[in-house]
Every structure is written in C-alpha cells, then in structure tokens.
Amino acid sequence: MNLILSSLTDEQGKVENFLSSRTELYNIKPIGIGTPYVESLSSYISRIAEDHNLAVSALLSKVIAPMLNIDYLKDQLSQGIIKDTSHFINENSPVTLEYSNALELLTSRDDLRSLTMLNWQGIFSKKLFSRYRKWCPICLNKIKSNSKIIYEPLIWYISDIKKCEVHEVVLHDKCSNCKRNLPFLHKKLMVGYCQYCGSWLGDNLVFNKKNLTEEDTFIYQNYKELLANSSKQSIYPTRVFISNFLNRLMKKLDIRSVAKLANILELNPGTVNSWVKGRRQPSSESLLKIARKIGLTIYEMIYDNNKKLVLEIKKDSYLQQQKSISISEIEDRLKKEVNSKEPKSLNRISKEYGFYIDTAKRNFPILCEKVTENFNSYKEQKVKKRRIEIEEKLKDCLSKETPISLNQFSKDNGITLKTAKTVSPNLCKKVVKRYEEYIHELKRQRVQIIKREIKEIVNTLHQKGIYPSSNKVQENLENKHLFRKEWVKQAWKEALESLGYN
Ligand SMILES: [Zn+2]
Ligand SMILES: [Zn+2]
C-alpha cells in the first residue's frame, strides 16, 4: 500500500533504478499451477509488481510494454493506457498471448500460459470471462488468516462460475466499500484489494448464500479439470476439435443426419450443423450442454478417446428404443397405424417408435406405401374441410350488419391473412371492398355532421350580433383542431356567404 501512495518522483526513481540494475524480472513461481485453483495472470502481475517494489502502472508501461509485438497495445500501454485491453488479459485472445509471452521472457518461465485459458483456445469461443474481477470474500479472508500469499484464482473469473464451491456463496464483483466493478488490470491493481479505494475485499460475514445445484457442480468439475490439466498435456485441441468430435460421435452411434444428432443433444439443428461443418464454435454454455448430455466432461471429450462415450450415450432412452425395436415389431406398428382413424406420416411413426424409415421400407414396402397413402388422403381431406370452414366464415362475415376489415376477420377467427387469401381470394376481395365502402360512407356522414355543426355555430353567433370569425367558430367547435383542414375552412366561408358576409 505504501507503494501506491508514494510520489511520482519516487516512482520514477525506482523504475530507473530497476531498469538500470536488471534486464529481467525475478523468476517468481505462480501459485497453484497444476491445480484447479491456479492463479490468474492479472493476479500474478500484481504480485510481481509488489515483489519488485514497483507500481503496476510502472511494471506495465516501462517493463512489459517494450516487450510487446502488437503495436497498438504497445503504444497504449507505454502511455499508461490499460482500460481497453484489460478484460482480455486472462482469457484466450491474442492480447492474452502477448502478455504471457512477454512475462515468460522477462521471468524466464515457460508455464505462464496456464494462468490463462490460452491452452484451451481451440474449444472455447470468446467471452469466456466476465469483464471484471470476481471473488469469494470468505476464501480471501481464509488465505489472509493462514498468512499465505494473497492471490486470486483464475476460476473465479470464468463467467459460468457463479458461486464459491467451498463456501457456497455468490461470488462478489463489486467493492463493498466504493461499490465499483474492478477491471482485471489497473495502474493501482493490488490482488485482494480494491484498486480504487484500497479496501480489503475479504469478509467473513457473507449473506448471499446459495447452495450449489447439481448443474453448478458439473460446471465446476469441467473447469477444474481443464485448469488443473492446462500445464500437463503436450497436445491441446485446435479449432477443428468440436467438428471432429461430433462427426466421430455420429459415426459411433450410427446417426446419419445432423437433425437426429441435434434431436439427441436437444439443440437447434442449424446450430449443430454449423459446428459439425466446422463453420462455428459452440459457446461454453453449449459445450457444457453437449458434455452433460453425453455423460462426459469436456476434458474427457478431448482426451479420453471416447472410451466411455458409447457406453454412456446408450443410456439415452430414445436411442435405446431405436436399438431395441425388432423387425416384427415394426410390422405390428405399421399395421396398427394403417388402421388408425388419424393417420400419421411414416416419418412421424418412425420417430415415435424409434426405427429407421429405410429399414421399414426395405422389409414392408406395401405397408409403408399404404401408410403414406392413408396419410396423404387424410391430409387432403383435412385441408378440404378447413377450406370449407374458412369459406363459411368469410361468407358469415359478409352477411354481418356492420362490415369489418379483413385484418379484423383474421384476428377474430385466428386465420392468417395469407391462408384466407389462398383459400378464397374472391371472398377476401369482397370483404375488403365492403369495408372500404363502409368507411367511405362513415367519412361522408361525418363531414356532413361537421358542416352542419359549423353552419349552426355561425348562425347562432350571427343572431347574437357577434361576427362569426374563424376564432369564434373554433371556440365553439367540439373538435378545435378541425379548422386546420381546408374543407372545414371552406364550410365556414360558405356559411358566412349564405348570411351575406363576404
Ligand atoms: Zn469461498
Ligand atoms: Zn473500492
């Protein structure tokens, strides 16, 4: 804290002293490498600055900035501008890589990527992290009271992680003293403390307790595995991972269409297709959903070579049905459906009972044909019936005393305009025409009424010996804004003329 309060000249002196005496930073060991609670890169930067007796601003602008390759980042940082890139520091972006490379060179370490999500960039799209620091106040107090080195684990910053696994409290993301969100990097960053007001972020009294759900636990398990192993592998997944994985999955399960795969995963077919084709990457949320559905963790999806995969997915009831229905059962189902009063399509039957259409067609071509025939004629009849119904309603509408618009008809009867127009363009035209005439007549009547009203007002004023000026007439009109209209002015003039004014 003294460091933060020290004057600028002092700081300048320290930097110069530092730069002249060393070309490197001390090789300080990051906390928790190889464990789920590995330190974040921004936490490491804060500790490095403290250990070298430098302000974070000086460390960033004088020591790290000269080592960077991305020009705009280098320029900004050497001018002390941190804000724009702060939220990328711990994730899996080119900015993250710049920082970790620079620090690896400066500290002669080769494991600083594991303080970020860089090793997992192949499986995660961007936006894996929240924009601001998050922490468990109880954990921070525990770390402090055990007089361990204070640090902030990377796992806290992941958006999908909302609670502390140990204390089951919602992670904090605002300083309880100054109520501000705290960006990852800041010129006065100090791990465990608020960079704005200097308050300690730990607390033993936390009221926002929320038990971990089964889903929370699964999410934790996934990220803990990835973080604990992010320094242990020699090969990491690339951008083609998810596409390869889904293709392998389809092959193993003998799924021939992406639609079916999407059905099993309970995800949108178009989206799943874009992953299968390698055009897009799933969000972390979708990735977790896939993992959960197939009973693996993300880490197992990558490294277990799918040993458990087939075993797990067979538990899926839908697939079980699909595997267990026999040829004779297919025949029974088809026979039953042929006699049904509400015929279904072959496609729907195959889905409901879980067999392949191809299998059914190969074994029972005549039955299948009959099913399709029944369904088509049933559909045709249904369409015909509906058509008659709509026509009746349109005729009904035309015989009503007060005409309504086609829009109103559509709303009242729950029939879309498109359907109505397709079923009977002529009747629709009649409805439209009748309504237009009705509206026209209403308008005509209204004009007459207003003209009469004006004439009466003019006469009354005249009889009282008052000149019926436009102002006077307006005052007496029910709707005063009417006088803006040309035909209303005209009616007033005519009324004046009939009384001999000109
Ligand atoms: Zn905690
Ligand atoms: Zn604060």
Image (cartoon, helix red, strand yellow):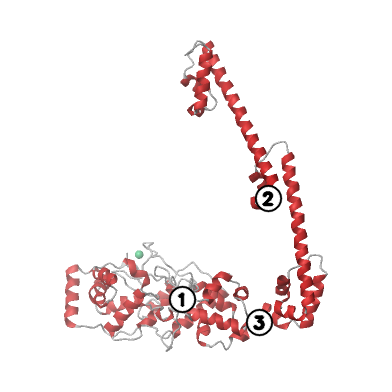
Looking at the image, residue 156 sits to the left or right of residue 312; the answer is: left
Q: Quick one: quadrant of the N terminus? A: bottom left
Residue located 82% across and 65% down the image = 341
Quarter of the image holding residue 360? bottom right
Dot 3: what SS? loop
Q: Mark 2 Cα within 10 Å, few/some/many (few <14, many 20+)?
A: many
Residue located 43% across and 74% down the image = 156
Task: Report the residue marked by disc 2.
Answer: 420
Residue in front for this viewpoint, 187 or 298: 298
Vertical relation: 402 (above or below) 255: above
Label number found at residue 440: none
Q: Position of residue 165 (x, y in %)?
A: 49, 76
Q: Position of residue 233 (x, y in %)?
A: 43, 88
Residue located 25% across and 69% down the image = 75
Q: CA distance from mark 3 to mark 2?
A: 48 Å
Closer mark to the observer between disc 3 and disc 2: 2
Nearer the N terminus, badge 3 or badge 2?
3
Task: Report the residue marked by disc 1.
Answer: 124
Closer mark to the observer between disc 1 and disc 2: 2
Task: Report the residue marked by disc 3.
Answer: 315
